[in-house]
Image: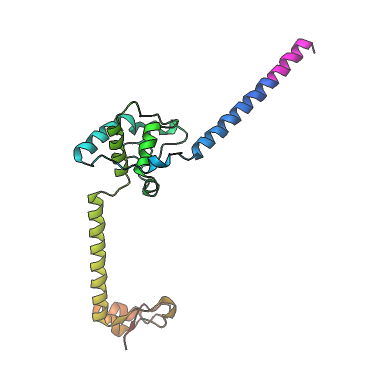
Amino acid sequence: MSTVVQLNLKTRKILFALLLALICLVLVYAAFQRDRPWIVPEEVKKLKNPIVPTESTLKAARGIYMEECAQCHGEHGKGDGPKAMMHSPAPADLTDARQMNSVTDGEIFYQISEGRKPMPSFKKRLTEDQRWGLVLFVRSFSQPTAATDKKLTTAKIQLSRRRIKYSALTQHRGFQFIPKKKRAGNLRPALCAPCLGPFVAAFSSTPSLPSLATARP
């Protein structure tokens, strides 16, 4: 093998090793960036949002969000926008109440203002009031709406009514429910016959049928 060929082969090996090292460095850097916490000055963390959450403010902030943020964070803030898969780290899920409650308004304002790759900085692209308006709108994704609160309240009331009705019915029929481990014997026809008639009376004598209730003494 000639000297020139040997040098070319050696050069190729060196270039290949350098390429592998570069790929490793990029992967390590990406992992570091993904796990790196935001470093926010303490005085900024304590900042309070000076913007009042009015309908017009939220409407304007929504327009900015849809234009500047929805492509990555998604229309509903779930981090599932059309461009979300193109970025690492992935866009934050703004509907995560636990995560959103762990940061202050000042921290969110700082993140919007300064940015961090792949998220751009909006300090020069948006006014201070617009950025504070975005803080309000971003917060709204993790907060239950009035409709959601109404549904939850209605469901709790219905469940409470069912429990009261069920309790009254069992007391009227003379049933006393007991833990599963203490249940023994068969269903007593005298307890169930008034409601279920001969069907329960016939099957209650089956030895394999466990007891569900016992009469009060």
| Position in image of residue 101 (x %, y %) | 37, 48
> Considering only vertical position in the picture, is 124 above or below 104?
above
Residue 8 lies in the magenta-colored region: yes
Q: Is residue 81 visible?
A: no
> Considering only vertical position in the picture, is 28 above or below 197?
above
Residue at 37% of width from left, 39% of height from top? 108
Q: Is residue 123 visible?
A: yes
| Position in image of residue 9 (x %, y %) | 72, 17
Farthest-out residue, front: 43
| Position in image of residue 63 (x %, y %) | 26, 32
* Quadrant where the image shows the C terminus: bottom left
108 or 162: nearer the viewer = 108
Query: To which quarter of the image does residue 64 belong?
Result: top left
> Considering only vertical position in the picture, is 99 above or below 39?
below
Farthest-out residue, right: 1
| Position in image of residue 62 (x %, y %) | 26, 35
Residue at 23% of width from left, 80% of height from top? 172
Residue 185 lies in the magenta-colored region: no
Query: To which quarter of the image does residue 61 belong?
Result: top left
Farthest-out residue, bottom: 217
Q: Which residues are magenta?
A: 1-12
181 or 22: nearer the viewer = 22
Left or right: residue 112 compared with residue 87: left
214 or 50: nearer the viewer = 50
Left or right: residue 2 compared with residue 11: right
Residue at 23% of width from left, 50% of height from top? 146
Magenta part mainly helix, strand or loop? helix
